[in-house]
Amino acid sequence: MISLKPDFCDIELPEQQYSIEDYSSSKARWCSGCGGHTILNSVQKLCTEEQLPPEKTVFVSGIGCSSRFPHYMKTYGFHGLHGRAFPVASGVKFRRPDLHVFIVTGDGDCCSIGAGHWVHAIRYNMNMVALLFDNSIYGLTKKQTSPTSPLGTISNTHPTGSVLPPINPIQATLGLPNVSFVAQTVDWKPKHLYATIKKAYEHKGLSFVRIVQRCPIWMKDSYEPTVKDPDAITLLHHKDGILLDEKGMKSFRHVVEHDPSNIVKAREVAELVKETTPIGLFYQNENNSRYDEYGAHNLGITKEERINAIDSMMDRYAI
Ligand code: SF4
């Protein structure tokens, strides 16, 4: 409670409380049954539980179905260019380290045209959360093969089936220098999805979360068996990993112990994807260099001085 001075007023005002409506903008225009809806719900829940000030929270996206995300959040947002979510978000975070910055990207946006930016954002390791909505197809443009489409996927670009093996975004990220947080979840396990996004938010560094996302319009046959088959998912469990309550744990038939401080083992577990979909925390290391911190030291100014400098620069353009 905020207590105002008694000689001024003795009424006690409650601290500002944000409800989920404070983060919800227009109704999401994704298809019915799209995995994007549950991801949006989880992110809005996180914002509410963490009481993130909407004016201090930014969602940056590229292009694609998932990249409509900033429109559905009543926060700041930037719906930008294809593949450019990472550099735009990095610029925001570098100059405004006080903001909560989230990156929303899709498999085409991140792993194809944006792959170069993805690699360097992982290496720069700035304190942000990157959510990769991976439905393994270009959905917005009506079914073209994406870099994560399974071999043999029939699409408009490959009517007789795709011919190249897909990129495994977890494996690729774990191979990058200075990687500090890699996790995987699925949109149809809301407890695990939420716990993963929360763990990513709490991490100090660039948190990379791949969310296996249903696209019932173009990839129904690909995801339906995984959603229905309890043997299709393996839960990674560890006291330092993503923790679920007893009820949440019971919804998984296959559980393996995996210590997220072991990057060599994490790379081996990422290979499991050929037989099953492993979900959980693959790797975490909060001791890696963070470019957002280095940048402040390098400029010889404090975080506050950096924010004031960008504010006065922007004021020059105020109308
Ligand atoms: Fe979601 Fe697929 Fe529809 Fe895009 S096309 S909104 S990914 S269901």
Image (tube, rainbow, N blue to C red):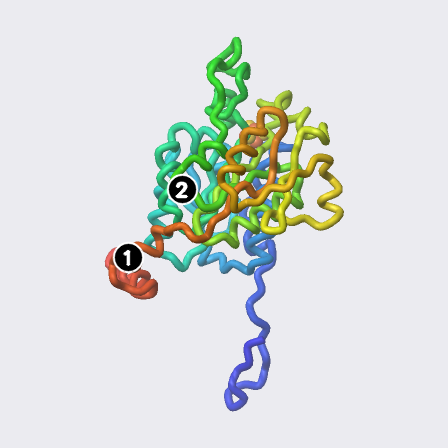
Q: Kindly state the secondary structure of the residue where label 1 is placed.
A: helix
Residue 315 sits in quarter: bottom left
Q: Amino acid at mark 2?
A: Ile
Ligand 1 resides in the quarter of the picture at top right
Q: Kindly state the secondary structure of the residue where label 2 is placed.
A: helix
| Image quadrant occupied by the C terminus | bottom left
Which label was assigned to residue 255?
A: none
User: Percent position (x, y) of residue 292?
Assistant: 35, 53
Query: Residue at the location (49% across, 37% down)?
Result: 264
Which label was assigned to residue 314?
A: 1
User: Percent position (x, y) of residue 179?
Assistant: 43, 43
Q: Amino acid at mark 1?
A: Met
Nearest the eye: 226 or 274: 274
Residue at the limit of the structure toward the top, as seen here: 160
Position of 228 compared to 293: left or right? right
Nearest the eye: 205 or 50: 205
Residue tagged by mark 2?
122
| Image quadrant occupied by the N terminus | bottom right
Cβ–Cβ under 8 Å for marks 1 and 2: no
- Counting residues from the N terminus, which is met first, the one under dot 1 or under dot 2? 2
Nearest the eye: 254 or 188: 254
Position of 106 compared to 119: left or right? right
| Image height of 197 relative to 211, above or below | below
User: Percent position (x, y) of residue 146?
Assistant: 47, 23
Query: Residue at the location (54% across, 41% down)?
Result: 282
